[in-house]
Image (cartoon, rainbow, N blue to C red):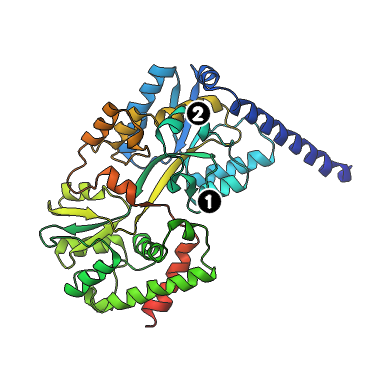
Amino acid sequence: MRKRLLPLVLTLLAACSTADGEENQEVLNKDWGEIEAGAADTEVRLYMWGGDEAINSYIDEWAAPRLEDLHGIKLTRVPMDTPDVLQRLQTERQAGQRDGSVDVMWINGENFRNAKERDLLYGSFSDILPNMEQYVDENSLDHQVDFGTDVDGYEAPWGKVQFVFVYDSEKVDTPPESFEELAEWIEDNPGKFTYPEATDFTGNAFLRHLLYSQFDEPEELLQMRSDDDEVEEKAAGVWQYLNRIEVNLWREGQTYPASITELDRLFWRGEVWMTMGYNEARVVNKVEEGSFPDSVRTFVLDSGSIGNTHFLSIPFNAPNPKGAMVVINELLSPEAQLEKLSPEGWGENTVLDVSLLLDEERSAFEAVDRGESVLDAETLGEAFLPELDAQFVPWLEEKWFENVVSGE
């Protein structure tokens, strides 16, 4: 009996998996009118990080009422711990459970890779969404790749933040435009620049920018891994650059801030005249709380600025896939993205290609005042670089200690 049990279980699981695939394909093949009609007067459960009240308010007080008014959809926000949810989905996949509890997930990066590789996602749905087709540049690298994993339509971009350098305009007249100009500025202003050590997320991002700058085209590096010979060869330029500027860094490069918090503190005290960060709008709150002066401004270099695009996806066993698609489509509407851009609320940059909007809509986006310290959307969009594969982070950390801290 035991000998027959395993084949029987595998057969049942295979049947369930096939049924999932057929049902998914059936929905994905429907036209948008059918999907929208099937989503009317249903509930959609959105599982997402719940640690920011401004983000929670955007969902609960703006998005949910709008979806109720437009589609009769009851949008329920559910705070989640992503690894726990993915583990639950994995268990449900193995058990052949076709009716889950999650309709939409806020997911990206390593979690997306794990979900995609384990077949925990619904399928390639994003090109079905009218707002994705009409307003999003699907050819943009930041929408095609998520921390080194091809998106392939399994998730839809929702928002993004971007790495910028921060300076005090009362001390720095004209910020550098390239890494070469930055090196020259550091030499002309010894002790007024540094960066967090490579164990810090922001410090590591600074190194990833330098690595990007060694390649003529961003796509080249995106297709590589850290153990590729060409990466090792190009990275030599990173270590040469860092060793070149080290003697003119804060405290002559004998020590580095352990975190971005420490670097910000040095900036606030005037010990350095620049800081940096992985969010183009974070300086707004810093100014409001008095941590940064009103004269603070931001800039990016001509070699590009790494950004983090975050995405919405649908689990393989979502109980309401039609509703999920309608919700995601609505969150990609110009109205929803404009509200999310407002500095009074979430304040996050849009994933829409503003040039594709109607004149009136584009004017509304351009009229949003994020303050003098925040770069305009066009400048940020032109500079945007996708995040590298996550395995570059520990590799750069190790190589930085080896080539910069420990040796010359």
Q: Residue at x 15, y 51 (%)?
A: 290
Which part of the image, by quadrant, shows the C terminus?
Answer: bottom left
Q: Residue at x 12, y 51 (%)?
A: 294
Disc 1 target residue: 149
Helix, strand or loop for disc 1: strand
Q: Quadrant of residue 406?
A: bottom left
Q: Nearer the viewer, residue 103 or 299?
A: 299
Q: Nearer the viewer, residue 249 or 183?
A: 183
The first of marks 1 and 2 along the sequence is 1
In x, y percent, where is residue 199?
39, 66
Crowd band around label 1 with a 10 angstrom C-alpha radius: few (<14), some (14–19), many (20+): many
In x, y percent, where is residue 87?
58, 45
In x, y percent, where is residue 201?
37, 60
Q: Residue at x 38, y 71 (%)?
A: 238
Q: Amino acid at mark 2?
A: Met
Q: Quadrant of residue 401?
A: bottom left
- Return the residue found at the far bottom: 408
Q: Does any portion of residue 291 appear in the rendered image?
A: no
Crowd band around label 2 with a 10 angstrom C-alpha radius: few (<14), some (14–19), many (20+): many
Q: Is residue 385 left or right of residue 391?
A: left
- Residue 28 is labelled as none
Q: Amino acid at mark 1?
A: Thr
Real-space Cα distance between discs 1 and 2?
Answer: 22 Å
- Residue 325 is labelled as 2
- Return the residue found at the far left: 170
Q: Is residue 396 left or right of residue 373?
A: right
Could you tell me if the residues under marks 1 and 2 are in contact, i.e. CB atoms within 8 Å?
A: no
Q: Nearer the viewer, residue 54 or 380?
A: 380
Q: Nearer the viewer, residue 139 or 80?
A: 139
